[in-house]
Amino acid sequence: MSTIPSPGPAATPGAAGPAAAVPLSAHEPDAATLARAAEQTASELLAPSAPARLTDVVPAPQRVEPNPSEEWRLPADAVVVASADPAALAVAEQLAELLRPATGYPLPVSDATRPAPASGIALVLAAEDSLGAEGYRLDVTRVGVTITAPTAAGLFHGVQTLRQLLPPAIESPIPVAERWVLPGGSIVDEPRFPYRGAMLDVARHFFAVEDVLRVVDHLARYKLNHLHLHLTDDQGWRISVDSWPRLATVGGATEVGDGPGGWYTAADYRRIVRYAAQRHITVVPEIDLPGHTNAALVAYPELAPDKVAPPPYTGTEVGFSYVDPSDERTYAFIADVLGEVAALTPGPWLHIGGDEAFKVKGEVYTGFVERAQRIVADTGKTVVGWHQLAPAAHVDGRVLQWWGTNGDDPTTLDAVRRGARVILSPGNHAYLDMKYDPDTPVGQDWAGLIDVRRAYDWDPGSHVTDVPEAAVLGVEAPLWTESVTSLAEIEFMLLPRLPAIAELGWSPRATHDWAGFRDRLAGHGPRWATAGIAFHRSPEVPWPVEGAGSTQPSRPQLPTQPGPDDAPVPSTDKP
Ligand code: TNX
């Protein structure tokens, strides 16, 4: 891989933009000329690199039919043409933005009544009942590429597949000389489960909006469609609420350790929601109740059982705090907060936590949850909560997020029999805050060590005894952040396990095969490395040997993390 000179911002990592937007003086070549030069350099200098295989996609598609007699090379003058529909055109523009930095090609976007691949890549919005709400079809022939889908979400997922069919160098933020070849054949694809998510705990440590947007990018790559934000906990309250302003200004001023904390304004939150929506990802906000509320009690002592403000909490224990379930002001508070958060959230879900409220027991707990569930229903949203909500009465649509470590759970099963659906986040498979191995510099181990195989080898459709697949809405990988303090550490914990959970949510069970997954996943190492992402080089995965082949990037620096001796992470005892 060699870089070609470019005068534009695309030459600066992190400032990648369309080459066509570069201001040019009269003496400098224009973007199209540079692109053609790059193309020529690539064909003259590079040995033909083996194209990615159509069967290498993660998550595994439903149906793949390679056609080895065809392949297509993206030319410098390629055009992205989409159906004349604003949502389809938006996906076309996103595709062009993905491809411009590494190729240096201008890749103009245009619309057509019947988009055809003759000039490059065609995105066709077309009613095809067989593809469902998120499915797509992708065809690569020697003429070009066509992605067909009944929805913009389907087109977007098809674009993520297309991206993986190009060489890893496509992830470069600066132009590289490469033969941009795609393997021929067809893919027909749609997800197994409608809910595929990841959770980011922004309460234990606060993360800037930009960091959250990068996490959204990772979700999008692997066709996840929900981002659950754990917005409140003992250590910090992270969303401003107009009717209770001290929640953010006082409750948001702390985090684990002695960091400054922080919170999202309504505008910040809307920005996250909008950015996610543009990537067909729904934000699920969580306000954790009645426990995990120390930060709220610091801000408003009248919510505390003894009406005395507790000291701010910056440790990592759980289960000690709760809002007063016997005080009407608590329910006024909940109605105000959930009402404002619901109004800021276009998605259908409101998550009310419910976990580890160790001091609110029995009927007091279920009574509290039942009122909170009704308050959610009054906002027009559907309630989601951790599976501790199970004993409370059913309300329409209710979803329990199951984080157990033992699939025999009669209480959750009973709630399912009363109509609840479940999202599967088994602590010992899907918890991305668990360490990979004893040497992982961040993370916990109360649910065990989780390397890639453990994250991958379970079946959401049959994991909780007697809960039928029909009651499973999907899967979610939570990242708790007691010990995770930076975007680099987030990415290190996400990759490579996030694609494993994504595959469980998307791919038909018939494709489940550890050996095959391990090999497909291996091809993503060079992609992350090219994008500058430090991921966990799991010994379970046969990552390509560095330096072999023209597109192998160098190994990224691992995030600078405190060693386990510098920053002991208290291990909490969990069920
Ligand atoms: C359990 S999972 C928790 C969180 C912790 C996490 C650490 C759940 C609903 N509660 O409060 O952050 O373990 O792994």
Image (cartoon, grey):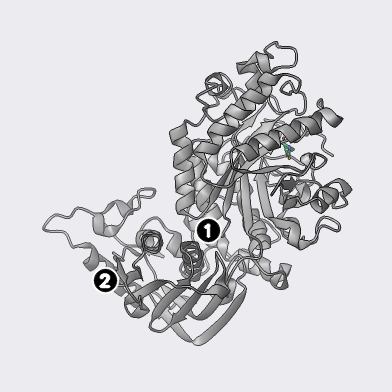
Which residue, as the protein is rendered here, is positioned at the far bottom?
69
Between residue 513 and residue 94, name the one nearer to us.
94
Label drawn at residue 303: none
Q: Residues within 10 Å of mark 2 (few under 14, many from 20)?
A: some
Name the kind of residue labelled 2 in the image. Answer: Arg
Which quadrant of the rendered structure holds the C terminus? top right
- Tag 1: amino acid: Arg
Q: Nearer the viewer, residue 253 or 47?
A: 253
Quarter of the image for residue 7 reads bottom left
Q: Residue at x 57, y 55 (%)?
A: 225
**Mark 1 crowdedness (10 Å alpha carbons): few <14, some 14-19, many ≥20:** many
- Residue placed at 28% from the left, 67% from the top? 35
Q: Position of residue 336 (x, y in %)?
A: 58, 27
Q: Left or right of 469: which side holds 50?
A: left
Is 287 left or right of 340, judged from the image as shown?
right
Ligand 1 quadrant? top right
Question: What percent of the width, then of the height, locates residue 547?
Answer: 52, 64
Q: Is residue 155 visible?
A: yes
Q: Is the CB of the residue bearing disc 1 within 8 angstroms of ligand 1?
A: no
Q: Which residue is mark 2?
A: 36
The residue sitting at 60% across, 22% down in the picture is 258
- For residue 221, the mark is 1
Disc 1 to disc 2, C-alpha distance: 29 Å
Secondary structure type for disc 2: helix
